[in-house]
Every structure is written in C-alpha cells, then in structure tokens.
Amino acid sequence: MTRPNVPSKANTVLLDPALKLGANLPLWRRAGGGAGLAAALARPDAIIETLKDADLRGMGGAGFPTWRKWTAAAASPCDEKYVVCNGNEDEPGTFKDRHLLRWTPHQVIEGALIAAVAVKANRVVFYVNPHQAEGIDQMRWAVDEWTASDLLASVSKAVGRPVTLTVAPSSGRYIGGEETAIVSWLDGGFPFPRRKPPFPFESGVGGLPTLINNTETLANVPHILKNGADWYRDLGVGAAAGTKLFSLSGDVLNPGLYELPMGTSLEELVFVHGGGMLDGRAFKAVFTGGPSNTLLTARDLDVALDFDSVKRRKSRLGTGAMIVISEGTSIVRKVAEYVAFFASGSCGQCPSCKCGTFQMARLLDRIATGRGVEADRQALDHLCRILPGSGRCALIDGAVTVVESSRHTFPDEYEPKARYAS
C-alpha cells in the first residue's frame, strides 16, 4: 500500500499546544480559558441546545448524543445532582484521556462545570484511573486552583448552591469504566455493573441523579460554547462534526495520539499521519475503537472515521483507538491476547462472562499456537452463539464480537493445519 496524496484538514482544538499547560489556571485563562464558561453562565438555558446543534457525541465509545444525556439529567427536579468525568481509560490501545488529564486539565474541568450549570449539579467528580499518577496529580492541583478562584463562585451562584470539585481514583480495573460500575465504586462498593434501568441520570451516586461523560466529551464543551455550534460542525469532514482524538498504535511507523477532523479516512490516518506500515509490510487489518469491535480490512481503508460511517461497515468508532495489524501477524494470536484481557478484566459477577471469556481465551490460545483440534473451533463457535446478552454489561458481548469478526474475516487462520491433531 502506497502513501496516498490526501490533503489533511487537520485541526487542533483539544491538543492545541497553547493549552498544554498542566495545572496552571492563570496561564489557562490568559490563553482564552474560561470564555466557554462565561458564555454558558450568560445563557445557561442555551447550553444544551448549543450542544445539540453542534452534534457533540459521547467520545467514550458509544457515540450517544451528548445533549440527550444532559437533557435527561436536567429534567430531574432533585436538589442535589452529580456530574462525573469518566477518566478510567483501561482498554488496550486507548491513551487519549490520560493526555488530556495530564496536560490540559483545565479544559476538562471547565467542561464539567458547564455541565454542572446546564443540569444544576452541585457535585462534580473526576474519576481517574490510579495507574495514571501524573494525571491524578495534575487534576488535584488544577481542582485546588479552581476551588480558590472566582470562577467556581460564579458557577455556584448559577447552580444555586455551593459546587464542590473532587478527584476520585477509580478501581483501576477495565470494568470500572462502565457507568453503573462507576456509581457502585463511588458509593464505596466493588465496581460491579448492574442492569439498566434505572440509568445513572435517574439514580446514580448516592441515589442522586448523576450525569456521566467521558473526559474527551467534556473537554470539547468549552470550545463549543466559546466558538459556537457552527464552528464545531465545520471542523468535521462531510456530515461529521468536530474533531476526534485517535490513539494510533500497532504496526505503523508513527504511532501516537492524533487529533483530526471527525470523518478523516482510515487511509489518511494510517498512511499520512501514521507514516505507513512498519518494514514496508502490507496493511492487513485494524481493531477499531479498541479490541472489542468488528475488524476492518484493506477494503475498508476508504471508510470515514466517524460514528455513522464506521457503523455502516458493521463496526464501531468506539474510543477512537486504532490498533493496526500488518500482513504476517497472526490475527488469531492478537484476538487471543485481547480475549485474555477481557477474561482477566471480568468482575466475576456473571458466571457466563467469567467462565465464558476464560474458555474462549483458552481455546484461542490452543488454536493460535498450533495445538487446536476441530473440536476447539466448534466449541468456540458454540460459545459465540450462547454467550451474547448473558452479562449485566457489554464485556462478554465485546469479547464475542471480536472473535466472531475474526472468524468471519480471516477464516483460513482458524483452519486446522496438517500438523494439528485430528
């Protein structure tokens, strides 16, 4: 695959070098920080409508329209509410939120406070993976700065009661990023997911209405309120709106974190920004949005990387993680590694998930290392038929999805070889 001649409409909003200040509120304000919050305070009733017009989606994986969540939380008449910034980020190949928390904590905090104004929440919690020690430190220092500033007093006045900011280390477990598991952990329990409804916006932390958004989602909010919905929509390509942080890793020359227009093609991401494939190898596949989605292959290089376009290819944009695989790399081996990750990340609450992911990982390891027999492949297919929908969260469904996708897309790699026992 050659490097295409594709012009890049690159925009840096969240990763603007001028905002890479860490916990330094005076510098943040001199760089234009606080303008989005000022606009929100001037017209609090217009906040949610502005996000709707901007078509801001949830950047934690689901791509759910942000304004719908905020509308539901705002509709609750409860006097006390929570806003939770989800910075758990523990999935292989995803490393965007830790950058925002470490280098630009103030735009995250400003976005969370705008959310508090919009839904009338008086408690704001930054839920951060404890493995990201620098991110936690920067967020704590930044929170101290906001707590002592006039800005927080203005927010409290708009909300109608004192607003508190708290940094809460998460459990550090993969499952701890699921929103009902967040509620359980912040309530002092183990991060066990539960079935919905009730949704957190109905009954969340302490039984109070709780709005939970991903770090990247909240980081976009101040810029939208400052510059307007049309500005944000114009950043995207085609019908897509805004920018997206892509965590590019795997067999590319220039892995890293890239902020690009939503709707940038997969080919441009890999061959322009990523510099192409390592050792001149051919592109084989990519795990999109982390390892729990359907694989895309070379025939999908033209896909626009936005939620709707990737969905039309029977996959998901997810968190924007793109794990690139080159020819010569075993897909079964990679899938085995990721399913083993899911098995270790299972909370153990649902036997079908705990046992099912373990059995799938064991079968995949046998097949990937040449020890598989036909019965192993049949057992794997049987598990993929009976496990979906059997857990309280989507972990088991994600594990099944990547196995089924690899079985469908690369069936030859699962075929028993002559050296296999029959």
Image (cartoon, rainbow, N blue to C red):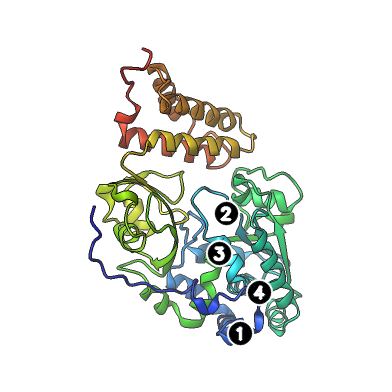
**Which residue position is annotated with label 3?**
99
Horizontal side of residue 321 vs 270, given as left or right = right
Q: Is residue 41 visible?
A: no
Instruction: Mark 1 vs mark 4: give the one in front.
Output: 4
Residue at image point 39% right, 57% down: 307
Horizontal side of residue 300 vs 321, given as left or right = left
**Which residue position is annotated with label 1?**
29
Secondary structure of the residue carrying tag 3 is helix
Q: Residue furthest top?
A: 422
**C-alpha gap between disc 1 and disc 4:** 12 Å
Q: Which mark is residue 89?
A: 2
Badge 2: residue crowd in 10 Å (few <14, some 14–19, many ≥20):
many
Tally of numbered tags:
4
Secondary structure of the residue carrying tag 2 is loop
Query: Earlier along the polypeptide chain: callout 1 or callout 4?
Result: 4
419 up-or-down from 89: above or below = above
197 up-or-down from 405: above or below = below
**Which residue position is annotated with label 4?**
23
Badge 1: residue crowd in 10 Å (few <14, some 14–19, many ≥20):
few
Mark 2 and mark 3 residues within 8 Å of each other at the beta carbon:
no
**C-alpha gap between disc 2 and disc 3:** 11 Å
Instruction: Please provide percent x and percent y for residue 59.
Output: 49, 60
Instruction: Please provide percent x and percent y for residue 30.
Output: 59, 87
Query: Earlier along the polypeptide chain: callout 1 or callout 3?
Result: 1
Q: Quadrant of residue 238?
A: bottom left
Mark 4 and mark 2 residues within 8 Å of each other at the beta carbon:
no
Tag 1: residue type?
Answer: Arg
